[in-house]
Image: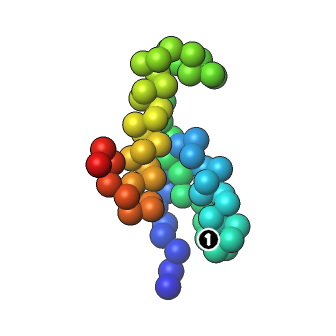
Amino acid sequence: MQPRKEMNSFTTSALSLGLALVLDLPKVHRFVAVPDADHSFSAEKHRVIMLHEIESFLAEHLGASPGR
């Protein structure tokens, strides 16, 4: 089985890295730019965006459905 070539980018790469190390697969990640967000995602609206993106990423790669 060939590893997926899709390479999205996002900060959930820590989870992907852990799975990649265990399964010896390339890291899958997703990059999401949140305009005006600081490093700590201090504003609630930025945290909501980040959490929705994490939920979507995990649903896509772990098979769960978001918003269930």
Q: Nearer the viewer, residue 1 or 65?
A: 65
Residue at screen point 37% across, 58% down: 64
User: Which residue appears farthest toward the left when viewing the image?
Assistant: 68
Label 1 crowd bin: few (<14), some (14–19), many (20+), radius 10 Å: some
Horizontal relation, residue 57 to residue 17: left or right: left
Q: Looking at the rendering, which quadrant does residue 26 occupy?
A: bottom right
Residue at screen point 45% across, 53% down: 58
Instruction: Read off the residue under disc 1.
Output: 25
Work out whether residue 62 can be spotted: yes
| Residue 49, horizontal then vertical, whole percent | 42, 29
Residue at screen point 49% across, 25% down: 47
What is the image's colouring?
rainbow
| Residue 16, horizontal then vertical, whole percent | 59, 57
| Residue 63, horizontal then vertical, whole percent | 38, 63
Q: How many marks?
A: 1
Residue at screen point 29% across, 49% down: 68
| Residue 59, horizontal then vertical, whole percent | 39, 54
Q: Amino acid at mark 1?
A: Leu
Work out whether residue 9 can be spotted: no
Horizontal relation, residue 22 to residue 10: left or right: right
Above or below 7: residue 45: above
Q: Secondary structure at mark 1?
A: loop
